[in-house]
Amino acid sequence: MPRNTETKPDARRKLLDSARMKIRKTGFGSMTVDELCKDAGVTKGAFFHHFKSKEEFGVATANNWDELTSGFFKDAPYHTLADPLERFLGYIRFRRELVTGDIYEFTCVVGTMVQEIFETSSDIRDACHESMFNHAELLVDDIEAAMNIYPPNTKIDAHSLALHTQAVFQGAFVLAKSTNNAAKAREIAWEMIDHLERYVLLLFGQTTNDGGKK
């Protein structure tokens, strides 16, 4: 998953880096400022120098995740594919490749946070919403181009289909977490993503090499 690449991160960067891992492991609500500062190797004074509150830090964490993932996916290899449907499928397959390691390593920071705080912090919720919906929008141009070349066999909206992909990924992550077993979690997530790929192929009337529906 995306990581910051600064060679000498400042206290703010260290805190954000530490939070991304800690939130996916134990959640945002249970994370204390003291624990975060200890994990990041910074002082509590440094935390409050950069952030007025834990809530402000949560917003910054969501914004940072959005920035990092946007850059990460912008440089992903599937963008080199000439066919827009192949780029869309390439994105789905790329997401599948990212499901590796332990559960917290492949799940989503903003997806984890928003499940906890959607009723208790409108600022963090809105930042998480923006991150997830912004990511979905990255797919819309390729989906619309694919629709022009391969007319779907039913009426669809490109924006809605883009959001559906995110619903599958986030749902797969929730199911994966419920196992509390890394190997089983990866297997479940892979299966859900494979179903998504098959759905897209069927939606655009595509077949396998032997002529059968994949």
Image (cartoon, rainbow, N blue to C red):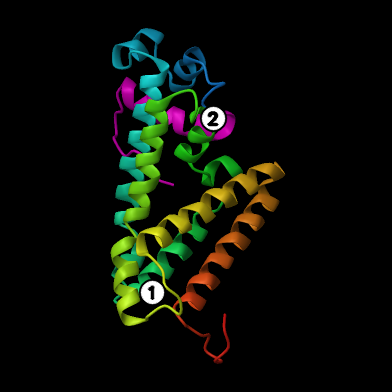
Which element carries disc 2, helix, strand or loop? helix
- Res. 194 image quadrant: bottom right
- Res. 86 image quadrant: bottom left
Which mark, by number, is residue 116?
Answer: 2
Query: Does any portion of residue 193 appear in the rendered image?
Result: yes
Q: Position of residue 183 (x, y in %)?
A: 68, 51
Left or right: residue 114 versus residue 123 is right
Report the residue at 31% width, 39% height from top: 5
Give the magenta-colored segment's residue range. 1-27
Left or right: residue 173 versus residue 200 is right
Assign the C terminus to one quadrant of the image.
bottom right
Q: Nearer the viewer, mark 2 or mark 1?
A: 2
Q: Position of residue 159 (x, y in %)?
A: 36, 59
Report the residue at 42% width, 78% height from top: 152
Q: How many marks?
A: 2
Which element carries disc 1, helix, strand or loop? helix
Label 2, residues with CA under 10 Å away: few <14, some 14-19, many ≥20: some
Compared with 13, 49 (above or below) is above
Report the residue at 51% width, 85% height from top: 207
Amino acid type indicated by mark 2: Glu
Amino acid type indicated by mark 1: Glu
Query: Does any portion of residue 83 appear in the rendered image?
Result: no
Asked if residue 18 is among those painted magenta in the image, a careful observer would answer yes
The residue carrying mark 1 is: 86
Q: Nearer the viewer, residue 13 or 163?
A: 163
Q: Earlier in the sequence, mark 2 or mark 1?
A: 1
Distance from the alpha carbon under mark 2 to that under mark 1: 35 Å
Q: Position of residue 56 (x, y in %)?
A: 36, 20
Q: Position of residue 9 (x, y in %)?
A: 31, 28
Residue furthest front as drawn: 155
Compared with 27, 53 (above or below) is above
Report the residue at 40% width, 20% height from top: 55
